[in-house]
Amino acid sequence: MNQSGGRERSSLGWLTLIAAVLGGSAAAFAYTAGWLAPERLTPDRMIAALTPPSGPPLGHRRNHAKGICFTGMFEASGNGVELSRAKVFVQGRYPVLGRFNLGTADPNAVDATVRVRGMGLQISAADGEEWRMAMINPPFFAVSTPEAFHDLLVAAGKKDPEAMKTFTRANPEFAAFAAWAKAAPWTGSYAEEPYNSLNSFVFTNAKGDEHAVRWSLVPMAEPAAISQAELERRGPDFLEQEITDRVRSAPQRWTMVTTVADPGDPTADPSRPWPENRRKVQVGTLVVQRIEPERDGPCRDVNFDPTVLPQGIRVSDDPFPAARSSVYRKSYDLRAAEARDYPRNEAAKP
Amino acid sequence: MSNVPHRFAPIQRLLHWLMAFCIIAMLFIGVGMVSTVAPKYLPLILIHKTLGVALLVLVLVRLALRLHFGAPPLPADLPPAMKLGARLSHLLLYGLMIVMPLLGLGMLWSAAYPVVLYGGIQIPALLPQSDQAHTLLWNAHVYLGLAFFALVLLHLAAALFHALIRRDGVFATISPLPQRERMKPTE
């Protein structure tokens, strides 16, 4: 045997092995990153589905793009302590920062064209611990899963009228939401709307007892139904003018009502409301004291990520908060990078 | 020359393999978590943040140990280009180990996200919210993370090259296994 030839052959074998280890590692990395799986539902694909045909709202949130900032107080009644050890449930007053908004990707949408209204809210404990949430006014969510929400956005964006029919057949839970959207009365004020968590979360109290809950901010203002046509007549930005005037004349209040699930209630599916007779605990009052335009307002740079939770509150088996967190982060990263396109400081005109 | 170590100190070898495992996990978790909307997104991001801060502490300990114990010399017959490559790549690895967690923390601070680790440990923000800073830090974290993975692959390739082809004792200096008797030269 030629010894040096044998050594070369074995070197070649080792080199092949090294190449295989590197190639395998790189392939595993690419797989993990989703580069080999274009069908995976990524935050990028969700953002793409949210983007209107006219293009993304550069510098703005990718959804709920039209909004106005508020500040105020959360007055905890102390009743929440039995459910959660979160500090903001201890009787007292906690500063809040929030944003009234419309469920649209168009920051210049006409108010009367947007069915869903929302509220982003951040409550801060004395030590700076934050609780962020983003709620909307329908009593239940449109679909059961983030995948179905993606499919809904895609179907709604198609010109083909069959697309929505196909979607509804595949996701029958959507029918209840469509009925709500058609029949629920409109109001002429952000102050007259309830804002519902819809997603369930788990509250843990000081003893370690756990309860699945959902919560709602129930307006103290009496809702006055108006027609969509009447809202349209009042102007494209009526809601922002109205809430500004209303809060200037008096602070506006909402009662925070926590609903506790019974065992077996559908905690993982926000499209399914829980029975009306579930235990409800009034944990406090939201007081909105001041309205500021979004541009240069304190809510502009806040991502109301519903998974920013204090100790004593955690996510449940509801798949939406994780999906929302992932997509909101992407939306934040995008609009931060597009800050130049956001019309800040324009209000400085006389 | 009897003071020159033949191997890294046991604590250095332990830290090397512990951190290697964690860093590879961090790189995979990093690219995995930003490409999913599934419920695992939340535990992955919590692990990523917690492990990232732990690795920042560990790399500082490791740097101190490296300055204290030094490193075994490279084989005298290693070509100068390879020596330079070895030194440069180690410098880059240390740099990335220190910089990556700082960029990660910075991009969270500049986005006004509270940094809460496993067990509810809160890391106070050292930077104010800033769109420009967030964008810069986020891009740096992403692209340096990808470069880090490429460098880890290069490091792995070099380690295997020393261990399997050159068989020059370089791998033994960091090997987690107890040192074997030095091989007798083949006849």
Image (tube, rainbow, N blue to C red):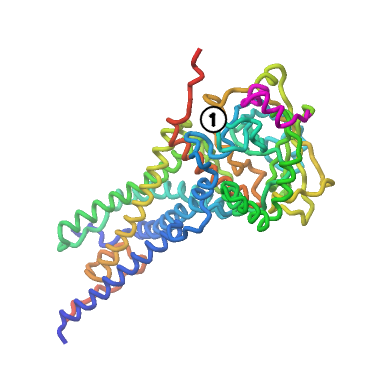
* Chain letter belonging to callout 1: A
**Relative to A9, is A94 above or below?**
above
Residue A46 located left or right of residue A179: left
The quarter of the picture where the N terminus of chain A appears is: bottom left
At label 1, the amino acid type is Arg
Residue A209 seen by the camera: no
Residue A238 located left or right of residue A280: left
Residue position marked by numbered label 1 in the rendering? A300
Residue A295 seen by the camera: yes
User: Which of the 4 quarters of the picture holds residue B17?
Assistant: bottom left
Tell me the SS state at disc 1: loop
Question: Where are the magenta residues, as a range?
Answer: A223-243
User: Which of the 4 quarters of the picture holds residue A191?
Assistant: top right
Q: Position of residue A69 (x, y in %)?
A: 60, 27
* Magenta-span inclusion, residue A115: no
Q: Residue furthest right?
A: A277
Q: Position of residue A312 (x, y in %)?
A: 67, 44
- Residue at 71%, 16% (x, y): give it: A249
Q: Residues within 10 Å of mark 1 (few under 14, many from 20)?
A: some
- Residue at 71%, 41% (x, y): give it: A138
Query: A20 and B161: which one is in front?
Result: A20
